[in-house]
Image: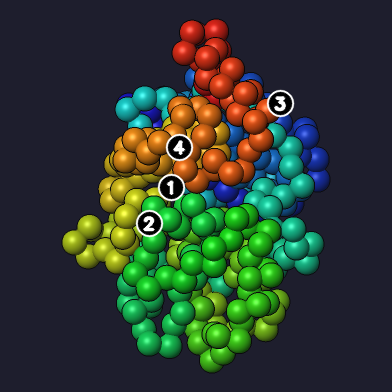
Amino acid sequence: MFTVSALYHFTRFDDPGALQGPIQSLCVHEGIKGTILLAREGINGTVAGPRPGIERLWAHIAALPGCAGFEHKESTASAMPFKKMKVRLKKEIVTMGQPNVDPMTGTGHYVEPSEWNALIQAPDVVVIDTRNDYEVGIGTFDGAIDPKTKTFRDFPKWWEDNKDRFHNKRVAMFCTGGIRCEKSTNFLIGQGVEDVYHLKGGILKYLEEVREEDSTWNGECFVFDNRVSVGHGLVEGSYDQCFACRRPITEADKARPEYRQGVQCHQCIAEYTDEDRARFSERQRQIDSGELTPS
């Protein structure tokens, strides 16, 4: 079994580039694969590897400037869910495109998973899912509003267009691991919303800690690795993935006439050109022949 670790932390890195090499070297040495993002605002990533190696990575990150007590969640996978180890430099560790948003100046009230159900069932609370539309499509909380955003950059405009619907309401927000809500709740506070809450540790922590019989979660939770989705107890889910658009798909979706492995599914058939599909087809041919390792 491999330990899968989702982690993030907002802090000030004066020179994130200086951190890139040592993290990459440690992960390669320890047999860890996945992706870690570094920016001046902090660190974010999901990786997998042998547990002793993951623990050494945690210790390394905790020793970075301002990272003591950083957030990390763990689950397991029966097979390595990543193909490579990548440590990348970015402008933001989660891209919202709002230069005035800074979680280090304040966020919404954290809500423990054990207290989440009571909050979102209160009549004066509106619950907003901050994830992308394809993530929401395979699972969400009872009564949650789906903004139908394609990317996190779309959220500020969606809020501006819809904020009057939530006048005099408390706002509860959630995402996969908690990082988006650090920014979305700070954004709402900057917009003058007084009572803002978010699920501590995100959906993953809720599915880990809350018993299925007590849960208000419906469906599965999309994750950004080869497991595709997880369910209660963080067990591997039932979804596969379209390797053209990276959206989750079911076995029934793969039986549809639009589906071509590695090339398209019913969700993305209109999104690519014939040239794109020719490229995807050649890539799939190379994978099938063993000339290329999927990534």
Q: Amino acid at mark 1?
A: Phe
Q: Is residue 170 above or below residue 84?
A: below
Mark positioned earlier in the residue sequence (1 or 2): 2
Percent of width and height locating residue 205: 39, 54
| Between marks 3 and 1 in the image, the one whose residue lies nearer the viewer | 1
The crowding category of the residue bearing disc 3, from other C-alpha atoms within 10 Å (few below 14, some 14 to 19, many at least 20), is few
Residue beneath disc 1: 222
Three-letter amino acid code of the residue under disc 3? Gly
Secondary-structure class at tag 2: strand
Q: Secondary structure at mark 4?
A: loop
Q: Which residue is mark 2?
A: 139
The percent coordinates of residue 225 (x first, y second) are 47, 36
Q: Amino acid at mark 2?
A: Gly
Name the residue located 60 percent from the left edge and 70 percent from the top edge: 185
Residue 142: percent from left, percent from top: 34, 69
Determine whether 167 is above or below 60 in the image: below
- The residue identified by callout 3 is 21
Kindly state the secondary structure of the residue where label 1 is placed: strand
Q: Amino acid at mark 4?
A: Glu
SS category of the residue bearing label 3: helix
Q: Look at the image and tell me whether residue 224 can be seen.
A: no
Vertical side of 280 occupied by 219: above or below: below
C-alpha distance separating marks 3 and 1: 30 Å
Which residue extends farthest bottom?
168
* Among the two numbered marks 1 and 4 on one chain, the one whose residue lies closer to the N terminus: 1
Location of mark 4 (residue): 258
Label 3 or label 1, whichever comes before in sequence order: 3
Looking at the picture, tell me which residue is in the foreground, 263 or 226: 263
Q: Quadrant of the N terminus?
A: top left
Quadrant (top left/top right/bottom left/bottom right) for the C terminus: top right
